[in-house]
């Protein structure tokens, strides 16, 4: 299981979390949830890509360090961390890890490859050189194409490095922009550097997701994916599509390059849809289509505020979509969710119960009357934390195998306590003893 340890970075004092399956962070606004999610994405996407580039180009370690640091600085504004030391360690598993640290206020950032990772880098370069020497010069048109084959044919099985090879997608809270900007305008903003790096990264993934949805990619590839899926998996995906329709109140369509929601009332331009539809459409299309496209390859999806602008029932349905997609594929996608919403936690608890009952042979038939068994979440694959005052705290109740209800109930109790006080004031006797 992956693990992230943060000491003294920006607003975070000490965070130590395990990551995998379903990972949920809840906390107030500006508590540092997004920093944690971006760090996880940084290590699983940018840091590993820097390692792969270094192996491909036979680069020295210090050049790889510079690339890792450059990406780090582009994601995390220097002004927020340069005046104090910090240490961040990301463990991909028991074999691999990377540490980024600033030992003193005036010192530079240092990158350390931990355990097998350093050997993976140095020996990986040698393996690729040998690979190149044994490949006929006319077999590949480019070094990148040759390395791609080497990466998945040989490198993936070297030094226990499976967990360095994941597809990663960061789905930001500001995703509604993709429902209102045309693809051409987005491309222009990205090319000129006038759009946030994380937004730009997601835009590329979302464009692929839309192409898959609209069947604009190779029919041969789509047929191969369809053939790989069982009838049972196809049924689960149909159910996912029904839930997505209920959230969006329509179906996503692309007509002559313009994007719409096709509703029961007719065709609706995305720019005229509600804020909830604009926020949820990019999220739902991405997790549905990309996990389908990469159904035989593990993926990590970092989702900020899945509940944004949605009614509680729709929030529950978004969680259902994620749970179904995780249960559907053999290489189950991993979800890292940041949220403000107690409804999201309650939804997960409900689906934990589905997972429990699903394992009981004598209860399965009763369960299937009202619930699709694929909705179940396995407690063993759940991590949940609150982020308070810069510290992480697990909110799992190991005894009940649920997210601790205390945190969920505390939100309601604030309203309830104030409501009771107001009732006391309203119905209390006045100074003369009259009500």
Image (cartoon, rainbow, N blue to C red):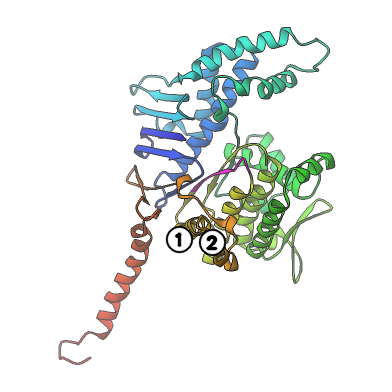
Question: Which residue is painted at 84% across and 53% down in the image?
Answer: 256
Q: Quadrant of the C terminus?
A: bottom left
Where does the image place residue 102, in percent across and percent down from the top left?
38, 23
Residue bounds of the magenta highlight: 330-337
Which of the 4 image quarters holds residue 228? top right
Which of the 4 image quarters holds residue 223? top right
Secondary structure state at the residue bearing disc 1: helix
Where does the image place residue 412, in percent across and percent down from the top left?
37, 66
Which label is found at residue 412? none
Query: Looking at this view, is 235 or 140 the one in front?
Result: 235
Question: Which residue is painted at 47% across and 61% down in the image?
Answer: 343
Q: Residues within 10 Å of mark 2 (few under 14, many from 20)?
A: many
The residue under label 2 is 316
Discs 1, 2 touching: Cβ within 8 Å = yes
Looking at the image, residue 329 sits to the left or right of residue 32; the answer is right
Residue 23 vertical placement versus 191 (above, below)? below
The residue under label 1 is 346
Question: Which residue is painted at 84% across and 42% down in the image?
Answer: 219
Q: Is residue 229 magenta?
A: no
């Amino acid at each position: 299981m992956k693990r992230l340890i943060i000491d003294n970075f920006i607003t975070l004092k000490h965070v130590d979390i395990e990551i995998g399956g379903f990972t949920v962070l809840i906390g107030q606004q500006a508590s540092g949830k997004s920093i944690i999610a971006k760090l996880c994405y940084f290590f699983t996407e940018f840091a590993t890509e820097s390692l792969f580039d270094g192996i491909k180009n036979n680069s020295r370690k210090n050049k790889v360090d510079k690339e890792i640091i450059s990406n780090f600085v582009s994601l995390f504004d220097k002004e927020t961390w340069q005046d104090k030391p910090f240490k961040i360690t990301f463990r991909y598993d028991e074999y691999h890890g990377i540490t980024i640290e600033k030992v003193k206020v005036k010192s530079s950032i240092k990158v350390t490859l931990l355990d097998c990772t350093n050997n993976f880098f140095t020996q990986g370069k040698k393996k690729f050189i040998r690979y190149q020497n044994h490949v006929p010069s006319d077999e590949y048109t480019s070094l990148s194409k040759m390395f791609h084959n080497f990466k998945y044919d040989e490198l993936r099985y070297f030094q226990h490095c499976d967990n360095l090879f994941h597809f990663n997608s960061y789905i930001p809270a500001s995703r509604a922009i993709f429902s209102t900007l045309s693809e051409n305008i987005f491309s222009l903003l990205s090319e000129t550097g006038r759009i946030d790096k994380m937004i730009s990264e997601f835009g590329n993934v979302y464009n692929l997701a839309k192409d898959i949805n609209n069947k604009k990619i190779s029919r041969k590839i789509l047929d191969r994916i369809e053939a790989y899926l069982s009838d049972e998996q196809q049924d689960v995906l149909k159910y996912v599509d029904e839930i997505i329709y209920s959230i969006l109140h329509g179906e996503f369509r692309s007509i002559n390059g313009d994007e719409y929601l096709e509703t029961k009332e007719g065709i609706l331009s995305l720019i005229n849809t509600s804020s909830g539809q604009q926020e949820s459409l990019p999220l739902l299309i991405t997790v549905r289509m990309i996990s389908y496209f990469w159904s035989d390859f593990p993926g990590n999806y970092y989702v900020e505020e899945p509940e944004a602008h949605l009614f509680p029932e729709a929030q529950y349905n978004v969680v259902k979509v994620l749970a179904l997609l995780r249960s559907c594929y053999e290489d189950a996608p991993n979800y890292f969710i940041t949220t403000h919403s107690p409804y999201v936690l309650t939804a997960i608890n409900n689906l934990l119960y589905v997972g429990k009952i699903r394992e009981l042979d004598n209860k399965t038939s009763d369960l299937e009357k009202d619930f699709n068994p694929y909705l179940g979440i396995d407690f063993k694959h759940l991590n949940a934390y609150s982020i308070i005052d810069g510290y992480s705290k697990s909110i799992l109740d190991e005894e009940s195998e649920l997210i601790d209800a205390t945190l969920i109930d505390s939100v309601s109790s604030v309203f309830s306590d104030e409501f009771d006080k107001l009732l006391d004031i309203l119905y209390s006797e006045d100074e003369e003893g009259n009500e």
